[in-house]
Image (cartoon, coloured by chain):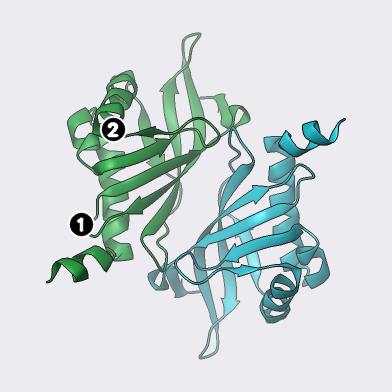
Chain colours: A green, B cyan
């Protein structure tokens, strides 16, 4: 495959769904390196949507180094959706330690875009303060 | 409220979730005018994501004039998610007449952005050919 073909190629929806499941599994396994490795260089994260985005491998590694050790449990609530382009989306719940002890559930939809190699070039997480409930 | 305040104001996540439910209900009721009325002037639709977007009330009205009379049945599969900005997302299933007779189920995630009045300024629908199954 030529460089030009590679640059314009999108992963299939099946490949994007597998990458989303790897993301869920890596967070549940508390494997920060595996999570960060799913991202392309220069990728962006906007989590939650409406907050300033972060960019680049170093910022992304720092983000997950804070988040992953919390011991989150992520569970898709429906099959991930593909698209007719280089993007996919999934609805999931995050079972997280609550600030005051116990657990809380956060309802989230993530949208990822992908490069030709199937790495995430962006992640946007849709959740509001009132998407949280006691677990 | 001043014009400047209105322009920078976002609807609450609760308001955005209600608008998403109105969208589902209006399509299920085959009320094309009610669906189109949820959109702001100049809004864009990209359905499916990866296809050319359409823009403006006339194009949006033509789009739903084709889609709504099909008799689709939409059902959210999880509560709609808000954000910390002017966007919200929902995972749902579309029960639609299949090309060869019978019904098919299409799994979709829609992402909408909103103006200060709670009208949709954009809709992007994530679904791939392999997000369809026999109903």
Nearer-the-camera pick, A83 or B46: B46
Protein chain holding label 1: A
- Residue A17 point in image, percent of width and height: 32, 56
- Residue B70 point in image, percent of width and height: 67, 80
Total marks in image: 2
Give the residue pinned by disc 1.
Answer: A117
Assign a secondary structure to mark 1: loop
Nearer-the-camera pick, A79 or B135: A79
Relative to A67, residue B8 above or below: below
Q: Residue at x 18, y 31 (%)?
A: A33
Q: Which of the 4 image quarters holds residue A56?
A: top left
**Residue situated furthest bottom in the rendering:** B100
Q: Does the rendering let one see residue A21?
A: yes
CA gap between label 1 and label 2 equals: 24 Å
Dot 1, crowdedness within 10 Å: few (<14), some or many (≥20)?
Answer: few
Give the residue pinned by disc 2.
Answer: A28
Pointer 1 and pointer 2: residues touching (CB < 8 Å)? no
- The verdict on a common chain for dots 1 and 2 is yes
């Amino acid at each position: 495959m030529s460089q030009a073909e590679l640059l314009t190629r999108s992963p299939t929806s099946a490949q994007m769904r597998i990458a989303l499941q790897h993301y869920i599994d890596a967070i549940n396994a508390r494997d920060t390196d595996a999570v960060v490795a799913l991202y392309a260089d220069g990728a962006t994260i906007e989590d939650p949507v409406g907050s300033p985005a972060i960019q680049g491998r170093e910022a992304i590694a720092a983000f997950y180094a804070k988040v992953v050790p919390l011991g989150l449990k992520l569970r898709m609530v429906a099959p991930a959706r593909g698209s007719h382009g280089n993007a996919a989306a999934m609805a999931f719940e995050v079972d997280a330690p609550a600030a005051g002890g116990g657990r809380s559930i956060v309802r989230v939809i993530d949208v990822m875009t992908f490069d030709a190699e199937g790495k995430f070039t962006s992640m946007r997480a849709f959740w509001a303060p009132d998407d949280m409930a006691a677990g």
